[in-house]
Image (spheres, helix red, strand yellow):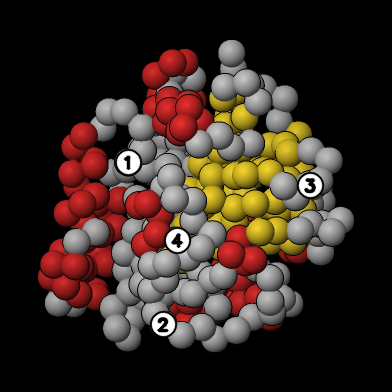
């Protein structure tokens, strides 16, 4: 991929890199024009890093600021080895872009992303169910593409499907309807007419009722065959085989077999687990990050379920 550029704010609806088997992916790249070569990564001795569900802003300012410092330490830790960094949804517990206003409180994190882009490190950003109201700020100000659906990438000959994961797989019909409402242009237009002080306060109160803010114990329980993203991966694999499926949203780090040779990884979260995926030419592994007594990533040994 090329060093940081200022892309033209035009949606890409005809990316040749998107498989014809996933026609809904053709409009997934929002306000950023990428070519097929941009989604074909050659590691050249470096690594890809994937993380999701930072939920910056939740549940309160002080704990979010501590988490933000930890995430920035992680970004510094991986920067020299990074061929690209994938931020796979729910990075913010709430995000809405008015024409002239964005939510405050995340400046150190945004500054770190800008610094990494100035170093020429590619960053790919995915929306989740908490930050689905992103528009062109990341693209125009930071040169970071924003994806609203899963995308397919190629890494050293391996085919990988990456996305946040909300609304995929069986079940959860209520959320799937709500997502269609919230992502509609009418809903966003109406919210934009709400004064930011009121709108952002209301949205943060709503997000405060989320499962991550309330530390749901059910998230730590493996659901077996009822793991809906695992079921989704199996369904896709039957028609379009992949080597890896990488999703967030579940808040539980997982490494599960899909078919004969594919693997589904869930990235976990950063409110309590600090987990991420590291992909090199030699191996792909889930790690947990700690910056005490010094920054380090440690392999997760208890994330596989049969």
Q: Marks 3 and 4, Cα distance to the nearest angstrom?
A: 23 Å
Q: Are marks 3 and 1 in contact (CB under 8 Å)?
A: no
Residue at 64% x, 66% y: name it.
37
Considering the image in quadrants, where does the C terminus appear?
top right
Q: Is residue 20 above or below residue 275?
A: below
Between the residue at mark 4 and the residue at mark 2, the CA separation in whole angstroms equals: 14 Å
As helix, strand or loop, the secondary structure at mark 1 comes to: loop
Q: Which quadrant, please, contains the N terminus?
A: bottom right
Residue for badge 2: 9
Q: Residue at x 24, y 49 (%)?
A: 179
Q: In this rendering, would 156 be left or right of 162?
A: right
Q: Residues within 10 Å of mark 4 (few under 14, many from 20)?
A: many
Residue 252 placement (x, y as % from top left): 52, 32
- The residue labelled by disc 3 is 280
Residue 50 position, x and y percent, is 62, 50
Are the residues flagged by discs 1 and 2 in contact, CB closer than 8 Å?
no
Q: Could you give the CA–CA distance between mark 1 and mark 2, rounded to whole angstroms?
A: 27 Å
Q: CA gap, disc 4 to disc 1?
A: 15 Å
Q: Residue at x 46, y 32 (%)?
A: 239
Residue matched to label 4:
147
Secondary structure at numbered mark 2: loop
Are there few (<14), some (14-19), or many (20+) residues within 10 Å of tag 2? some
For label 1, the residue is 167
Coordinates of residue 136 in the picture (x, y in percent)? 40, 77
Nearest the eye: 51 or 279: 279
> Is 39 or 65 nearer to us in this picture?
39
- Secondary structure under badge 4? strand
């Amino acid at each position: 991929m090329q060093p940081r550029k200022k892309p033209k704010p035009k949606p890409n609806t005809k990316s040749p890199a998107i498989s014809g088997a996933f026609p809904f992916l053709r409009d997934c790249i929002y306000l950023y024009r990428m070519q097929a070569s941009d989604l074909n990564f050659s590691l050249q001795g470096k690594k890809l890093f994937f993380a999701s569900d930072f939920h910056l802003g939740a549940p309160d300012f002080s704990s979010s600021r501590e988490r933000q410092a930890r995430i920035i330490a992680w970004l510094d830790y991986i920067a020299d080895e990074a061929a690209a960094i994938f931020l796979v949804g729910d990075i913010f517990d709430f995000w809405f872009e008015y024409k002239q206003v964005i939510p405050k409180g995340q400046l150190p994190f945004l500054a770190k992303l800008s610094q990494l882009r100035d170093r020429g490190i590619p960053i790919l950003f995915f929306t989740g169910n908490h930050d689905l109201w992103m528009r062109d700020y990341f693209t125009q100000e930071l040169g970071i593409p924003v994806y609203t659906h899963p995308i397919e990438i190629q890494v050293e000959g391996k085919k990988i499907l990456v996305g946040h994961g909300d609304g995929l797989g069986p079940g959860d019909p209520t959320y799937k309807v709500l997502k269609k409402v919230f992502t509609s242009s009418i809903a966003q237009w109406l919210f934009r007419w709400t004064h930011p002080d009121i709108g952002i306060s209301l949205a943060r109160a709503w997000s405060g009722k989320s499962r991550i803010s309330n530390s749901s114990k059910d998230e730590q329980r493996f659901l077996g065959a009822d793991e809906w993203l695992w079921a989704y991966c199996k369904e896709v694999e039957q028609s379009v085989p992949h080597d890896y499926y990488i999703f967030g949203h579940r808040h539980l780090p997982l490494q599960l077999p899909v078919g004969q040779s594919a693997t589904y990884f869930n990235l976990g979260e950063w409110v309590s687990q600090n987990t991420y995926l590291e992909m090199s030419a030699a191996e792909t592994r889930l790690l947990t990050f700690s910056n005490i007594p010094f920054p380090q990533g440690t392999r997760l040994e208890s994330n596989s379920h049969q």
